[in-house]
Image (cartoon, helix red, strand yellow):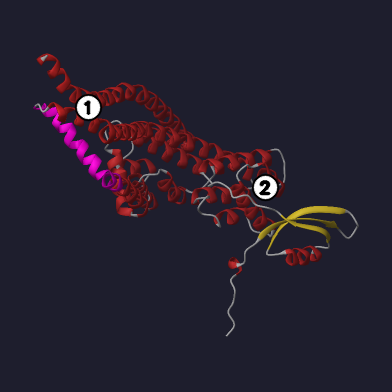
């Protein structure tokens, strides 16, 4: 029994070719194929007689980040507005990108489009980089003949969303990085510095103060079990992050917990509101129906609490409830957003009003991040000073007592 080989299992490469067409004119180009014979056969079918075929060396690229997709979207929108054909735009963006992984991705999409696949269908083949929201907006743009305008809106949306994400990460990473540095410093002191003091104090033969004995006991634990301490902390952090990524229950728990955190919870909540309103405003502006638009909005908020609220809103809206009333029933949106949404529904400019709400909350996030940065500095200085200073004082107490005796 013959075994069929799936097309997707055949490894393809990018070949650069040069040849002559039927008129004798020299032509050049690129093509994806499994080997040189396949390239020759394809070119001959197209009426091209190849004279040179060379496999392009693909550098191992870095990981593709959302920032790369946002930049690509902005470049594609700019070139299409300037009247550059779609396939040529992909060529220009792909060649100009420094990340080989992005270049390969764009070449794959270009090949699909060149063979007759619609742009949104080509994007849907890469769900890791192009989510449902992205593909739906591109599809709406293709159907309405306003692809360049929607790509421009999509690029603006992605840039604003990534800006909020980076600000939230910077606000959260500052205290985390300080805690890590403090742990490393304390570990070095406990393993190398305190044992040296212990040898000196043992030679005195005197009774040591309670703080000194406490620090020395902790030092003994570090010296004896340092491998276990690092293993438990490192392994615990790894398994915690994996559970957060893979377990839906863990994600729901952490999303709720993050919103209830003091100070940072308010910041995360405002960022979720900003992303939610910005996403829905972008979908409305593209002419996507409300119920269909809500499919993408919940996931774009980046929080399960807002995802669950969006699903509830979608059910109520589909049964005839107004958007403002459904959002009010969800009990997660501030009154300002509800009021602006109500005004938008009454005036028929809901996308404009939601965009204004998004602008307001994005500005609020900016102000909170700036305020937190200035607030965290003295708190961190006090924390580090108390921690390191406490250890230093505990180790010098016996020396002070000896000085008093002398």
- Please tell me whether residue 142 is drawn above or below residue 47 in the rendered image: above
* Residue matched to label 1: 391
Specify few, some or many for label 2: CA neighbours under 10 Å numbering under 14, 14-19, or 20 or more.
many
Q: Position of residue 119 (x, y in %)?
A: 62, 53
Q: Is residue 183 left or right of residue 346?
A: left
Asked which secondary structure carries label 2, the reply is: helix
Residue lying at 21% horizontally and 25% vertically, measured from the top left: 390
Residue 70 magenta-highlighted: no
Residue lying at 36% horizontally and 21% vertically, measured from the top left: 374
Residue lying at 42% horizontally and 29% vertically, measured from the top left: 360
Q: Earlier in the sequence, mark 1 or mark 2?
A: 2
Q: Is residue 361 left or right of residue 202?
A: right
Name of the residue lying farthest toward the front? 203
Name of the residue lying farthest toward the right? 24
Where are the magenta residues, as a range?
A: 207-232
Asked which secondary structure carries label 1, the reply is: helix
Residue lying at 51% horizontally and 38% vertically, measured from the top left: 157
| Front of the two marks 1 and 2 | 1
Residue 217 magenta-highlighted: yes
| Along the line of sight, the residue nearer the viewer: 279 or 181 | 181
């Amino acid at each position: 029994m013959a075994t069929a080989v799936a097309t997707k299992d055949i490894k393809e490469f990018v070949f650069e070719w040069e040849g002559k067409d039927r008129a004798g004119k020299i032509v050049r180009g690129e093509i994806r194929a499994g080997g040189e014979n396949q390239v020759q056969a394809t070119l001959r079918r197209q009426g091209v007689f190849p004279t040179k075929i060379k496999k392009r060396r693909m550098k191992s690229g870095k990981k593709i980040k959302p920032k790369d997709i946002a930049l690509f979207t902005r470049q594609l929108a700019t070139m299409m507005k300037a009247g550059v054909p779609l396939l040529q735009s992909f060529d220009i963006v792909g060649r100009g990108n420094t990340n080989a992984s992005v270049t390969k991705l764009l070449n794959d999409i270009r090949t699909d489009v060149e063979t007759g696949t619609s742009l949104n269908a080509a994007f849907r083949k890469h769900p890791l980089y192009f989510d449902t929201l992205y593909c739906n907006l591109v599809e709406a743009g293709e159907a309405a003949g306003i692809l360049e305008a929607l790509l421009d809106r999509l690029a603006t949306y992605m840039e604003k969303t990534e800006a909020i994400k980076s600000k939230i990460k910077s606000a959260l990473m500052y205290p985390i990085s300080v805690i890590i540095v403090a742990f490393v410093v304390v570990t070095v002191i406990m393993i190398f510095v305190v044992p040296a003091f212990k040898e000196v104090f043992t030679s005195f033969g005197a009774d040591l103060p309670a703080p000194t004995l406490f620090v020395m006991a902790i030092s003994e634990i570090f010296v004896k079990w340092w491998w276990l301490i690092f293993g438990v902390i490192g392994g615990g952090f790894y398994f915690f992050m994996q559970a957060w990524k893979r377990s839906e229950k863990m994600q729901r728990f952490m999303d709720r917990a993050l919103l209830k955190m003091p100070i940072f919870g308010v910041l995360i909540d405002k960022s979720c509101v900003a992303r939610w309103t910005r996403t829905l405003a972008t979908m409305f502006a593209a002419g996507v129906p409300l119920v269909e638009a809500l499919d993408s909005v919940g996931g774009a908020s980046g929080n399960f609490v807002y995802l669950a609220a969006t699903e509830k809103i979608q059910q109520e809206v589909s049964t005839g409830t107004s958007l403002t009333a459904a959002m009010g029933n969800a009990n997660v949106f501030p009154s300002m957003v509800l009021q602006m949404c109500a005004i938008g529904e009454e005036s028929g400019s809901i996308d404009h009003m939601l965009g204004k709400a998004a602008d307001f909350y994005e500005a609020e996030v900016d102000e909170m991040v700036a305020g937190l940065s200035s607030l965290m500095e003295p708190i961190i200085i006090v924390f580090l000073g108390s921690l390191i200073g406490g250890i230093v004082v505990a180790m010098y107490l016996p020396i002070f007592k000896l000085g008093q005796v002398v």
